[in-house]
Each structure stands twice: as structure tokens, then as C-alpha cells.
Image (spheres, rainbow, N blue to C red):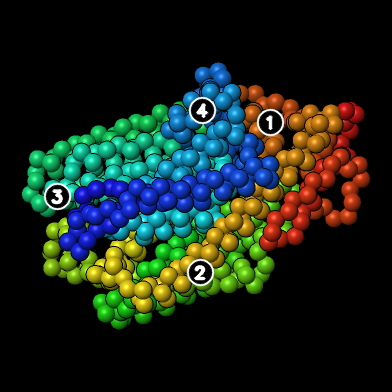
Amino acid sequence: MVNRVEIGTRADSGGAVQTSGSTWATIVTIGVIATVAAVVPLAVADRFGALGIPRSDDWSYLVTLFRLTDSGELSFNHWVSMSLVGQLVLAAPVAVVSGSSIAAVQIETALLGFAGLVLVALAGARTLGARWPGVLLAVTIAVGPLWGPLAVSYMTDVPAFAMSSLAMFLAVVGLSKRPVSLGWLTASMTVGAAAFTIRQYAIVALLAAFLTGLWWFTTTADQARARRILAIGAALLVASAAFFLWWRTVPDVRSLTPGLPDGHAARVAVVKGAGFLRLVGLSLLPVIAFARPIELMRRSWRASHTFVWLTVVATGSWLALSAWRVPKDIFVGNYLVRDGVLSDIVVIGRRPDVLGKPLWNAMVVVSSLAAIVLAVAAVRPIVGAIDRVRARDWRLRDPVGVYLALTTVGYATSFVLAMATGIQVYDRYVLPLLPAVGLLVLRAAAHAAVPRFARTTSRSWSPRLVLCSCSLLALAFVGFAFDVDSASFDGARWRAARAAVDQGWKPLEVNGGFEWLNYHRRGRPPEGSRQPGREAERAPTICVTVHVNPPGRPDDVVAVVESSAPTRSTARLVAFRTSHPCRDP
């Protein structure tokens, strides 16, 4: 077993750690991850004016944060449905020191994401015995199309990812030790409980460490530690439940109430379930290429011909039919959408497509093939698990692998349950799932290639590296295209609305889009709403509205701002006077 946790290390054939230019390798690794995870997204956002403005739902989280730091009042603006409290605790000092600077809070989010990806690389080095596969996984996640727009925001996805990554790293270290370390597992479970205070589904991090540790201590007849981890896990789960009950009492919370499964919910689960699988295939494409996909499928083929055939036919049909019937949810939505992050739901008008139809369709096909590879690769461990159940063999031979599998199953189950009960899910929810799936794929490749995984000849590396490098470059191209499009579009519509304000209109008289209106209303209930204990306020008349690419040329144009991106046509954000009677500014 590897007994150190440095990125710049490798293991020899006996499992002992050797340094290999450790200091320089660590510096280079951290520099690469910092560049793709934080520097590039921040530079893109700053270049296009998206640094320092609300983006997506984070208008509500920012209002909550600044109200808390300014007046000490905690309320959720009728919009917050995530736990959020843990994220407020992390960002409150930044908000206080920076004077409620949105840019400072966004920079903190990017740095948290960077830290989370470093932890992913460390977990990879720990469990794989080689540094670069884990680094590849971290870089792959960072260059994907979800990362850039989320990293420069105050959305909960990246902070929850960072906390979940810390929990995963602690669990991997603890489960790699012999005997398994209860202290490291306790730390992992505690961080998982903290992650739950940011996003509810992060409870998976706590449960995976708890169940794996309990299984190990029980099957190794370590009853004393089994009782201790049972008590610790139960206490943390009770504390999490108590937190959730308190959270529901916070003023203006938007609590999501599950409904009973029905036909519509089942259809959504089927379609978006395929979208999630396809999205994971896209997001981990370079990792899958590095892991020798043909060899992974051959191993499953040797385990069960029939199971592999059924998996290929069922998964392929599922992906094809869902893409044909509901193309708008082909990657779940609403970030990875053909016409850009959040599509047309944040401003009026038709946005240009980020990628042309041929390129988009090619991406769908390749992602679907990668998804099928993942499904087939899962056949071998599933068949092995079935055989062990039949033989009543309950020993835990690979606690790290089981932990990663439980994490994967836990997140997938949470998505399915949410969809089946009518709760909305989105593509960005997949972020904390990617490290677990990626490490499972890399571990499967390591086992298939032993002893070649850590020490491979140049001849065997060449096709593998070419395929992996091409996949990484292609994914980075897609990720950069969506990041630039999102930053350019968000910055342009904010500048168009700001131009109207500069001419004398009040912010609430300008419809600058979803984030503009809600952020400037500061979460106040609109006219006609029925919020218990609060009176609705009369909404100001909208005197200026911002449209994207309006047909013709509207009369009374107030401002025109162009949004450009390398892979799409230029969009015009036009602010113009509405027909409502308004005073002259």
C-alpha cells in the first residue's frame, strides 16, 4: 500500500513510495491544476465582464450572504432550496473584508474548486500508486464544459464539490491504511456532514465512508471499532437531520417537497437518466481513453458474454431513444445546452448556438459511445459481486473500491429518487460524482494493466497517449467554448442594463434579465405573491427591457452591446424603451 500522500510520487512494484523529482513534479502539478481550475476561468470572466456580477441562481445566494454580513439576518429570498448555510460560513469573512464584493466571493469559489481538484489528484496518487492518472482526472474535470461557468460564481456546486473531494481524500487515506484508520474515516464523515450543510445530496459522502468503514470493521471481527464507527456515524446522521429540520425554519426558504411518482416523473427519470450517463461519458472522455477502453470491455466480456450483450443493447437503445425523443435534455440541461449556459431562460430572445450542428452531433455520438464503455466496464465488478453473494462471501477485500462504488451508487440513486418524485435536477449536479467514477475507471485500468500501469514502454504508451491527448484537447475546446460564451453573454446583458441605468433609469425599471431583476429586488416578493407573514410590494413599471437579437430594430433604443465568442456568431443585446408610461430619466 502507498503510505504517503504527495502528488509528486510514484510506487514501485512492491507498493513502496519513491520520490521522482517530487518537489518539481508537485509544483508543476499544482500549477497546471491552478491554471485550468481557477486562472483561466477567472481570466475569461474578467475579460468579458462577468467577474463581479450575479450569474444564474447565485443572485439569491449573494443577497442572502450580504444581508447576513450587513445586518445579521438570515433569510432565503423565496428561492434558496439548497442547504447553503455551510457556504455562507465559508464566504462570510471574505464578504466582510471585501466590503460585499461579488468578485471577491467568486474568486473564493474558484479557489475552493482548485483545492478540491488538488484533493482529487492526491486521492488518485494515493489509490493508484502513480501521480499522473489522478492529475489527468483533475484536469479533465476542470476543462469540461460545466466547470468554467460554475467556478466563477457563487453557486453551491463547486464548494460542495470541494468539500466532497476533501471527504473522499480523507476516506481513501483511511481505507488504504492497515489496519483501516477510524480516525481518518471519522474526519471524512465529519467533512461529509459539513458538505451536507452546503448541498443536501452531499450526505452521500458521509454515508459512503460510514458504510464502508462499518463493513470493514464488522467483517474483520474488530467489534470495538465497529461499535465506535456505528456510534459516530449515527451521531453525525442525527446532527445532519437536526440541521435539516432547523434549515426548514429559516425565513423564506424554498423547501422542495417530493411528490408521488407518476408517469411524467418516470419519463423524466428515463430521459434525464440517459442524459446523466451521456454527460459522465463526455466529462470523463480523456480518462476513459487513458484507461484502455477496449481492454476494459474485454475483461467484462470474459466475465459474462450475455451480460455484456444485454448491457450494450439496453444502454445503446436507451441513449438513442432518449436523444431522439427529447433532444433538449440530451445532456440533462440547463448548463450544457447547445445555445449556451441557461439557454434562453435568463433573457428574452434567441441566442446563437455555441457549437454548430455537425460538431454538436459528433459530441453527442462520442459521448454516447463513452457512456456505453462505462456501462460495459461495470459488468465485471457487478458479476463478481453477484458471485460473492451467491457464495456468501462477505469479506471486504478492496475497501477503497467499495467506497468509490458506494459514492457512485449513492449520487446516482439521489438523482433517480429526485427525478422520480418530481424534483428538478440539472447537469451541474454531476460534479461530485465525477471523481469517484473517474477513479473507479483508472483503478480498473491499473488492475488490467499490472504491472504496466506504473511502468509502461514507449511503444504501449504511444497510441494510448495520442488518444488521451486528443480527447483532452477536444474536451478542453468544448469547455472553453462554453465558458467564453457564458461569460461573454452574461457580461454583455449586464452591461446593456447598466447602460440604461447610467442614462437615468432606476435599476428596478430595467428588465436586464433573470439575475438583474432578482438581484436588485433583493428577494422581495413581487406584487400578487402570497408569502406568509410578508406583504407583497408593488413591482415598479418596467421602462427598459433587454432582448437578445430582437427582430428588426426596436424603436427608442437605449443601448446596444455585442456579445462575441470564437465558436458562434455575434449576439446583440439591445436595451430599448417599452410601451409602458414612464417618466423621462
* Residues tagged 1 and 3 counted as in contact (Cβ below 8 A): no
Q: Which mark is residue 520?
A: 1
Q: What kind of residue is marked 4?
A: Val
The quadrant of the image that shows the C terminus is top right
Nearer-N-terminus badge (1/4)? 4
Please name the residue that numbered disc 3 is placed on: 178
Q: What kind of residue is marked 1?
A: His
Q: CA distance from mark 4 to mark 2?
A: 39 Å
Q: Up-down: is 443 above or below 212? A: below
Q: Which mark is residue 94?
A: 4
Please name the residue that numbered disc 2 is placed on: 470
Left or right side of 261 for 574? right
Point out residue 550 in the picture as x, y percentages from the top left corner. Answer: 82, 52
Query: Which type of secondary structure does the marked residue at label 3 adopt?
Result: loop
Query: Which type of secondary structure does the marked residue at label 4 adopt?
Result: helix
Residue ID at (64%, 52%): 484
Point out residue 244 in the picture as x, y percentages from the top left corner. Answer: 39, 34
